[in-house]
Amino acid sequence: MAIVLFTDFGASDLYAGQVEAVLAREAPGERVVHLLHEAPMFDPRASAHLLAALVSRLPPGHVYLCVVDPGVGSARGAVVMEAGGGWFVGPDNGLLSVVAARASARRLWRLVRQPPGVSVSFHGRDLFAPIAAAVATGRFPDQRVAAATALDVDLGADDLPEIVYVDHYGNAFTGLRAAGLPTDRRLFARGRAIAHARVFAATAPGAPFWYENSAGLVEIAANGESAAQMLGLTIGDPVRWA
Amino acid sequence: MAIVLFTDFGASDLYAGQVEAVLAREAPGERVVHLLHEAPMFDPRASAHLLAALVSRLPPGHVYLCVVDPGVGSARGAVVMEAGGGWFVGPDNGLLSVVAARASARRLWRLVRQPPGVSVSFHGRDLFAPIAAAVATGRFPDQRVAAATALDVDLGADDLPEIVYVDHYGNAFTGLRAAGLPTDRRLFARGRAIAHARVFAATAPGAPFWYENSAGLVEIAANGESAAQMLGLTIGDPVRWA
Amino acid sequence: MAIVLFTDFGASDLYAGQVEAVLAREAPGERVVHLLHEAPMFDPRASAHLLAALVSRLPPGHVYLCVVDPGVGSARGAVVMEAGGGWFVGPDNGLLSVVAARASARRLWRLVRQPPGVSVSFHGRDLFAPIAAAVATGRFPDQRVAAATALDVDLGADDLPEIVYVDHYGNAFTGLRAAGLPTDRRLFARGRAIAHARVFAATAPGAPFWYENSAGLVEIAANGESAAQMLGLTIGDPVRWA
């Protein structure tokens, strides 16, 4: 399987590559997948809902190295978690908690001993990458972790009725799971009522609609245009059903 | 060999990583190369000419997973193709047709059976990635494809006298192949006549010129500046010889 | 170990992928790490200082393929270097010289024979990638290089009191190494005096501070905001100690 990176490090920036250079030494045989480095910046809550949705549609067994960590260098905890058939390594700031709350079973460990030489600002490279590499290569880091029962920050399993991500086409992801929703409902965002459509190709250009996107979330989109721009949507904007 | 991705998924976005996470399971031993995720968006025609040029300069034998697919979810077809020593998987909307038309020989199959659980909007992850993985690992997907003789959308082998790509330096690629062109010709773009230069270092800063770029295409460039910005060039702008 | 790419090719652009497609053929068993493709554009000097800092914090043994090369196609030389436990391949324009000057020992070779078919504008793909692949796979390219004693362009080992990089959070890296600096010093940039803080979490939102960043450099940052935007900092801006 692979070590899958989910961070707000910036897709064009120099942080993800440093993490991979460390993984290349610590886990030379493991594939590294850059899932997303533009997770909602400094926003563990929106990121947690996006992460949970993405993970639900990917093959099981990956090790997810997750870093959206505005509190790096503070006293916030760090955890290793097994949940839903995958492994997760990251800060204990809510980021992993939606995955945790929705999993039928999970196991949790808390990082209790840092290796020497950890920088104050880049735990992704110095702390989480070596741990993820150890997990991925079957060398569970018993000396550095202790079993734990609960996360410090727990956002729960409920959906989040907000915009959690805007992709480069201008599609706006909500934190609402779409499975089983009646398709005659209208979604309100920025004062506008938005009807359902099944696929892009079934809609007129320029008319926003909602549908179940490939991550299983309710998404606001528009055929051939940016729905986010059209409606002025940004991360954190509330949505509600009519 | 590698599985080479050519898409308009966005280099910073979350789609390419999901495709790679699927490939990590379906083709664990194969390298994945992210050739380009900023192909001309929703534009299979410009993308087709860019793809054909890039492929012509890369080592043979790769499996290209190509997705520029504004019609995803509609009735457009999907194909597997062997051409010019490489393999290609993608939608039948013209995207693969320039490669096909310029190859001395090609073989074509049409996807006739979808696996279960394919999303309506992300065939890259759910449909094309498993097929590309199967081809790359020598498990040709006989059960899902049927031999075909022609593409539904065929753009032909001719050059395209338009801007097909602008790189981050501001160099503007045309769809014109440069090999064998007399270098005393002047190219017209946006009402301006542009002379030839052999290399960047041979020109004065700020003077646009055309030359044969590393993809074998006629490119409009300027030494140390953005030719696209200087001349106001965008994808789709026509060019012609004086 | 890995082949680590450090370039100004653009993280979203089509150059890095072409390099990796060549490496996939020439070094099929070697991992490729995309460390940075947004190195200061056309700026070997700032890039050289950034590269030296990043390399100092990464595991030894990697092969670095480095391209910030405004003089491609001119008579500038090209080199292979072993320094500080790593290997480096790139143009002889100063880019590798800070790493060289700070290493306790180094060995240098000059490229003296180009393979056939090298394009005038993309030495990264056609010249440097095959050389880096040869070094990484233990097939040192004796036929193409000759031992050399000095670089043509040598920037020396000294720090650079300028901004050399701005990350996507808006943190501004200087070319000053931070180790051992007294933390009661104030840094001047754009006419503003900036005090030290140890970690982001220890500062008030909106107050710029300097600290030793994860690359070992003096960095100007602000908690939860863009210091670069707040202070108007760009690459090349001078800084000095009060």
Image: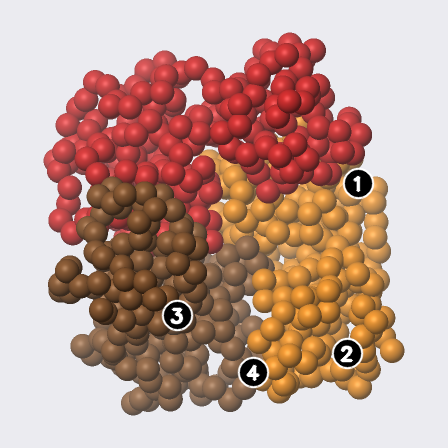
Chain colours: A orange, B brown, C red
Residue at left offset 83%, top offset 52%: A155
Q: Foreground mark, 3 or 4?
A: 3
- Dot 3: chain letter: B
The residue pinned by badge 2 equals A194
Q: Which of C138 and A8 lies nearest the eye of the viewer?
A: A8
**Distance between the alpha carbons at the discs numbered 4 and 2:** 20 Å
Q: Are marks 1 and 3 in contact (CB under 8 Å)?
A: no
Q: Earlier in the sequence, mark 3 or mark 4?
A: 4
Tell me the quarter of the picture where residue B45 sits: bottom left
Q: Foreground mark, 1 or 3?
A: 3
Secondary structure of the residue carrying tag 1 is strand
Tell me the quarter of the picture where residue A99 sits: bottom right
Q: Foreground mark, 2 or 1?
A: 2
The residue pinned by badge 4 equals B73
Discs 4 and 2 carry the same chain letter: no
Say above or below: C96 vs B60. above
Q: In this view, does C66 lie to the left or right of A87?
A: left
Residue at left offset 69%, top offset 47%: A41
**Distance between the alpha carbons at the discs numbered 2 and 1:** 44 Å
Tell me the quarter of the picture where residue B201 sits: top left
The residue pinned by badge 1 equals A148
Discs 2 and 1 carry the same chain letter: yes
Please name the amino acid that badge 4 sits on: Gly
Instruction: Report crowding for label 2: few under 14, some 14 to 19, many 20 or more residues within 10 A (C-alpha).
Output: some
